[in-house]
Amino acid sequence: MPASRSTRIVLFVYGLLVIGLLYLPLVSVGFASVSRARYLSFPIKKYSSKWYAEALASGTVRDLLWTSLSVAVIVTILSVIIAFFGALAFARYEWRYRTTFQKLILLPIFFPQTVLGLALLMWFNSLGVIPSWKTAVVAHLVWIAPIATLIVAIRAYSFDPALEEAARDMGASTPTILKEITLPLLMPGLISAGLFAFLLSWGNFPLSLFATGADSTLPEWLYAKMVSGYSPLVPTLGIMSVVASLFLILAAFAIAWLVQTIRDSKAAQ
Amino acid sequence: MQQLNQKLGYLSALPMLAVFAIALFAPLVVVVLFSIMPSKVFSLANMPDFSAYSVFFSQGYYKSLIWSLGMALASTVILLVISWPLAYGMAKVFRKFTLVLTIAVVMSLFVSENIRLFGWVLTLMKGGLIEGHIRAWTGVGFDSPLYGVPIIIFGLVYVYLPFMLFPLAQGISMVPDDARQAAADLGATRWQIFRQIDVPLAAPGIVVGCLLSFVLAAGAVAESKILGGQAVITITDDIETAFTFGQDWPLGSSLSVILIVIIGTLALFGISRVDLDQIMGRKR
């Protein structure tokens, strides 16, 4: 029962409308970031890039970016490693508690992040650990590693276990199989999981809020300025953070495309 | 072979379980223990007295909880209604546009939720993107819709759309076209097909979508703070305040425990009814 032409068009327009609404707030932030006035009001009368210059020159901004970046990079590396094994336990190996493990993985995703952040703060406190960006890594990890696992698991579902079994029959040890068969097969899943992990950590606010202690990530700083008085740097830094994410995504697509092209041309030879 | 699979299963689950043990279960235990401590202590070395729980009723914190759950329910219902046609389009109608939509929606998730909500403030405030331009063109302004309950629900709908849309699209794609075709051939109306074929067969997706958006919205705080100007206080807001300004960890913990129990019960109920192998497309 294919949809009629009119249904198709209505749904298509509806889809475009939803995409438009999703990004409308970012349009406003974008305009606000290039408004010259200290107190913003639309329509914008004078445009200027001075807030960008100010943001780039500011030491606070550099610290914020550095903290956010350190957290995101470490979270990405750890998440990918955990997700590689986690996905195998989730999708590949038939073991006794597999379905329980699958359900367990979903728990942190359902958990209110703010509450999780506070719970971690109390836990670190009772351990005598002083919160810093390192504890934020732990907080991000418990939420992001399960998501990365789900992404890798989708890939792990689609590969044929016979490949591993064949290698085993020929006498390959488990580490050899993991390295030579499983890892290359899961690689696309691992790369997208890494991308997700980085971007989710880079943009995360509720977990960072209580877990970073004296350090501050970019989203935290933005939030603090939003609720307690406006700073013209808020839209500027917001856009800078979005652009950074966008660059990363574009770079990932470009690299994926390049690898594919090289592989195709090799296969053609 | 079977035995090896067992061993490898346990081993490869280990790193994740270790993270859960130190960063999810242990903190949960601490929260539960703190929640039964007497008011305003900062260590667990006190006699438990459960006083924090009585405050939940006597100080009116239950109102925040009702607000949170009510707004979560409203946003979930709205999300279900507005996401269904789009999810249906993604699963059954669009071809390339499904990919475009998926990428567009996923990318929006990577932008910090603060920035997106703040963008709505700039869009909707008096002198904002919409009102400012309309006033400049027509000379007539209007009051900002910000700072009220409806705008908070709007914010929840906006932020949690992906969490309804994707499970729903996944659920609808599991409805076989043959079943719909057969029902139509037998003279079923559109409504009958929807009620008796689409909804029951897409049920796992509907359950996951509703559950995710309800649970996330129930624990949300940024929407009411940024868009709502704290017109109503959500339970998570109360929890935050108890920990920060209130300096009352046992109170914050007991409110957390109440929220966690409600959310946890719902989540476990839903998760236990869903077969993840099927949803995530296992082939064997």
Image (cartoon, coloured by chain):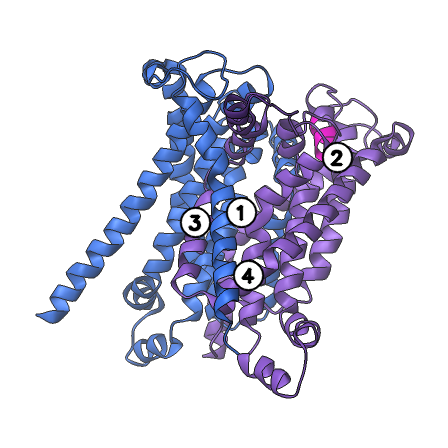
Chain colours: A blue, B purple
Give the mark nearest the N terminus, 3 or 1. 1
Asked if the residues shown at circle 3 and circle 1 are in contact, with their CB atoms under 8 angstroms apart, the answer is: no
Task: Say above or below: B36 vs A3.
Answer: above
Task: Say if the magenta span includes residue B76.
Answer: no
Chain holding disc 3:
B
Give the mark nearest the N terminus, 4 or 2. 4
- Assign a secondary structure to mark 4: helix
Q: Which residue is mark 4?
A: B87
Chain holding disc 2:
B
Give the mark nearest the N terminus, 2 or 1. 1
> What's the residue type where badge 2 is placed?
Ile
What residue span does the magenta drawing correspond to?
B236-240
| Image coords of residue A170 (percent x, y) | 28, 80
- Assign a secondary structure to mark 1: helix
Tag nearer the camera, 3 or 1: 3
Chain holding disc 4:
B
* Residue B65 placement, left or right of B88: right
* Cα separation between marks 3 and 4: 14 Å
Tag nearer the camera, 2 or 3: 3
Q: Mark on residue B19?
A: 1
Q: Mark on residue B104?
A: 3
Would residue A129 be visible to someone looking at this image?
Answer: no
Q: Residues within 10 Å of mark 1 (few under 14, many from 20)?
A: some
Q: Mark on residue B235?
A: 2
Q: Residue at x 45, y 57 (%)?
A: A151
* Cα separation between marks 4 and 1: 34 Å
